[in-house]
Amino acid sequence: MQEEKKSPKELGTAPIGKLLTKYAIPAVIAMTCSSLYNMIDRIFIGHIPEVGTLSLGGLAVTFPIVNLSAAFGAMVGVGASTMISIKLGQKDYPTAQRVLGNLVSLNIIIGILIGTLGIIFIDPLLLFFGASENTICYAHDYMFIILMGNVITHLYLGLNSAIRSTGHPHVAMIATVSGVVINACFDPLFIFVFNLGIEGAAYATILSQIISLIFVVCVLSNKKELIHLHSGIYGLRKNIVKHIITIGMSPFCMQLCACLVVILINKGLTKHGGDTAIAAYGIVNGITFIFIMVVLGICQGMQPIAGFNYGAQKPERVNAVLKKAIILATIVMTCSFLLCEFFPQYPVSLFTDDAELTAICVRGMRIIVAMTPVVGFQIVVGNFFQSIGMAKQSIFQSVARQLVFLVPFLLIFPEIWGTDGVWLSITAADGIAAITSAVMLVWFYRKQKGSYKKVSEVHARSIKHRIAYFFSNRVTP
């Protein structure tokens, strides 16, 4: 009865190119729009009369706390959605159902816990992450409201990932795009009309996510769907929680490392460039992050296809979707390189008209994007390992780029080249991380080739044994 309900069977049968397009386009639109949440906030905050630059600096130092919170949310959301895809490929529908319930329970528990701890220690955290006496008041006002709605953010992002894994990428896209549009409408209303300043941007973000969450819950409550919300699935199961955390540990480590990296970036920029340099990093990061989110959207489109077919033991389809995702990601990041290297002044002008801030942004952006053509490849490979449940490989790749490569550079380069050293650190780490990803992918394919050869040999021996047995036991008339 349950198998008669809607099931994403096309993941294992439809042409890979058509399938990736169907799943990736909505995911790309959703991820791009998702990146616009903070970008829209920056655009409006940057034009607040008299305090725009300081407000941008205050917003920039909140990134580590946001990343820290997002690390726990990504661990649950990505881990659960990947597990759902694999279980659907294995036709283990009851377990996929329970994974969805555990996703909800874990997001509520962790969302409330992180939000509460963040509020208690908000000022010490902001000072530790690079806030100055000039920017901490703006950072506090924004971050307090965001932390108050932390559980909403966790639930919304987690359930949106689950919708995509159950075969409804367009629904996930609609939820995200709607949230961004609502946020864009609320921002000027709360910031300028209600005169709430940077606090208004935070209220706009949380309210838009509440509306999107209500929509997502309504969709996932549809009993006609194979995987849906209902009573009896929310009790935490030790085995399920363990697998969710194991698979989700890669994005968790990546976000956690990003938190440490932003601390070092902020401290390096504070020492060598001051609050204006930190504001510049916030702008540059926002612009380049849009292209990265497009690549992450491609990865999200790849994830259910790779996970389903890996669970269904269809390696040729897994390899095909990986290849196509790498090609698309490389094209996107090459476009990022061309825009930000040759025409950086145009995107920067959206955020500020301050001449000094613009000059720092333009120089920093040109240095940072030098290695972006290979960044897409590195991101896709890391997400591929995560999609097929190879948590250790994905974790290593995430941690290596941030801790093994980037952190040492951030400790050394700024002391030699000042503010330029901060930008150069990011570029150098991206290049080495891409090489590491290539080595790991070659290792994976060699291992897979060896496994296929062994299986073929065993299969061949089995056939020979059956033939020999047939003729040895044949009755001669």
Image (cartoon, grey):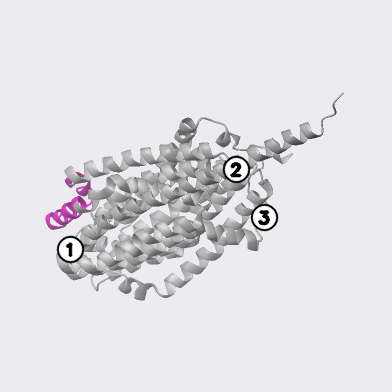
Q: Which residues are magenta?
A: 345-366
Is 347 a magenta residue? yes
Above/below status of 198 relative to 464: below
The dominant secondary structure in magenta is helix
Image-based side of 377 in relation to 370, left or right: right
Circle 2 packing at 10 Å, graded few (<14), some (14-19), many (20+), is few
| Residue where numbered disc 3 is placed | 233
Q: Secondary structure at mark 3?
A: loop
* Amino acid at circle 2: Val
Q: Mark on residue 70?
A: none
Q: Pointer 1: what residue?
A: 419
Q: Tell me the distance, in whole angstroms, between the alpha carbons under discs 2 and 1.
A: 55 Å
Task: Say what amino acid the circle numbered 3 marks.
Answer: Ile
- Quadrant of the image for the N terminus? top right
Q: Specify which label sits upstream in the sequence, 3 or 1.
A: 3
Which of the two labelled residues, at mark 3 and mark 2, occupies the earlier sequence position?
A: 3
Tell me residue 67's x, y (percent).
Answer: 39, 61
Residue that numbered label 2 is attached to? 455
